[in-house]
Image (cartoon, grey):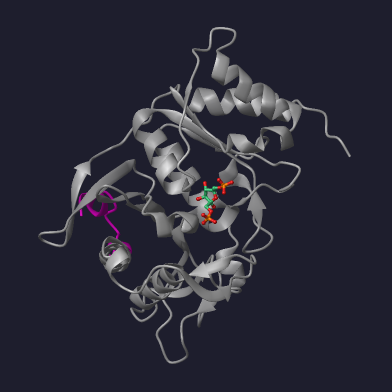
């Protein structure tokens, strides 16, 4: 509400859309919290377009987010990691001016072992004129985001979001069912004490990435040695670095020549949040928010977190000669 007051011409529609997403987050949070007690753990029995096994909770979260926002008249199309193509609002529903892209449950491989997972979302204004939205609405450069956020189902459930006026964190109070402002105006450290990477891929990285990580581990040229943390849920690793100071990398490697993470519904929203908190995000060459996606599920390498660390890694990776 405070943010809305900063925009004198706001109609309240964006706030209402954020409330719709909060409702979905509360429903997913309730299901995650009781997961070991209900029949919601394990594989759903289908694969998504990426060829990944869909978990029951992935499918539940996907439907929950879509159902919370498709029937409000506020959005024209949604797109998700779990859907092959963008999903326009159903025929007969009023199509609104917003577009929502999301990863309903990031870190799926952590679901069954009770390790933090998250939901990531990003909101754009539609570029199509009217009627149900289309793929073009979902393929905008990240710098055009109106809002982005994530929900972390961790030791408590937290919503962290930005509308381009700083980053704010809310903790779900389960006794009243509301997200309460607990972390106003989050700023991240300019230099991190932590790095997060799947170090088992070391032998598959380029020499430049190996050099960056070795230097961070050992300390080099005035850099203090960094400690390592890897949860293997982007939301959890990113959140930790945002609050404690650190940098997250998922680079290209010989097994994943485009990287592993998705530009549209994972990297772009996190990049918007990170920049708003004073950090930075690149693909090792370009600012993530400047990349115009060609396809919905396109992958990108990602370096994100403390500004000085991202700049250091980007300088070394970008200077590496391109090998055939
Ligand atoms: P899953 O959803 O398949 O668990 O992948 C999670 C993720 O996209 C991201 O959240 C993690 O940072 C990263 O992949 C973990 O990758 P590794 O499996 O290489 O550790």
Q: Residue furthest top?
A: 222
Q: Can you say which quadrant of the picture contains the C terminus?
A: top right
Q: Residue at x 47, y 64 (%)?
A: 125
Q: Residue at x 62, y 37 (%)?
A: 200
Q: Residue at x 41, y 76 (%)?
A: 63
Q: Position of residue 155 (x, y in %)?
A: 26, 47
Q: Can you say which quadrant of the picture contains the N terminus?
A: bottom left
Q: Nearer the viewer, residue 207 or 320?
A: 207
- In this rendering, is residue 311 above or below 303? above
Q: Which residues are magenta?
A: 1-16
Q: Position of residue 120 (x, y in %)?
A: 43, 56
Q: Is residue 322 visible?
A: yes
Q: Residue furthest left?
A: 175
- In this rendering, is residue 253 above or below 71? above
Q: Quadrant of residue 192?
A: top left
Q: Position of residue 188 (x, y in %)?
A: 38, 30
249 within the magenta span? no
Q: Is residue 129 visible?
A: no
- In this rendering, is residue 172 above or below 284? below
Q: Nearer the viewer, residue 182 or 233?
A: 233
Query: Would residue 103 appear left or right of 165 to someone viewing this image?
Result: right
Query: Would residue 48 appear left or right of 239 to someone viewing this image?
Result: right
Q: Residue furthest bottom?
A: 92
Q: Position of residue 294 (x, y in %)?
A: 69, 60
Q: Quadrant of residue 179?
A: bottom left
Q: Residue at x 49, y 45 (%)?
A: 232
Count of labels shown? Answer: 0
Q: Nearer the viewer, residue 317 or 106?
A: 106
Query: Would residue 32 appear left or right of 50 to someone viewing this image?
Result: left
């Amino acid at each position: 509400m405070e943010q809305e007051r900063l925009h004198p011409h706001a109609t309240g529609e964006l706030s209402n859309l954020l409330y719709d997403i909060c409702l979905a987050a509360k429903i997913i949070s309730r299901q995650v919290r009781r997961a070991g007690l209900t029949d919601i753990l394990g594989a759903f029995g289908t694969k998504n377009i990426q060829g990944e096994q869909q978990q029951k909770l992935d499918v539940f979260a996907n439907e929950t987010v879509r159902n919370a926002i498709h029937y409000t008249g506020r959005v024209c199309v949604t797109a998700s990691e779990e859907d092959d193509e963008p999903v326009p609002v159903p025929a007969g529903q009023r199509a609104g001016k917003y577009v929502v892209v999301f990863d309903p449950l990031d870190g799926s491989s952590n679901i069954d072992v009770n390790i933090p997972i998250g939901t990531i979302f990003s909101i754009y204004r539609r570029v199509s004129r009217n009627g149900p939205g289309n793929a073009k609405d979902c393929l905008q450069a990240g710098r055009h985001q109106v809002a982005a956020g994530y929900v972390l189902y961790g030791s408590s459930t937290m919503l962290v979001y930005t509308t381009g006026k700083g980053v704010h964190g809310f903790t779900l109070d389960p006794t009243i069912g509301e997200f309460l402002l607990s972390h106003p105006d989050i700023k991240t450290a300019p230099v991190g004490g932590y790095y997060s990477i799947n170090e088992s891929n070391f032998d598959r990285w380029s020499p430049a990435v190996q050099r960056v990580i070795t230097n961070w581990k050992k300390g080099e040229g005035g850099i203090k040695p960094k400690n390592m943390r890897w949860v293997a849920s982007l939301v959890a690793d990113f959140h930790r670095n945002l609050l404690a100071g650190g940098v997250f990398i998922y680079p290209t490697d010989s097994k994943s020549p485009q990287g592993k993470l998705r530009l549209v519904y994972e990297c772009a929203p996190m990049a918007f949040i990170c920049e708003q908190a004073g950090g930075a995000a690149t693909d090792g060459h370009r600012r993530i928010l400047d990349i115009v996606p060609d396809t919905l599920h396109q992958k990108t390498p990602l370096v994100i977190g403390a500004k000085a660390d991202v700049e250091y890694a980007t300088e070394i990776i970008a200077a590496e000669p391109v090998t055939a």
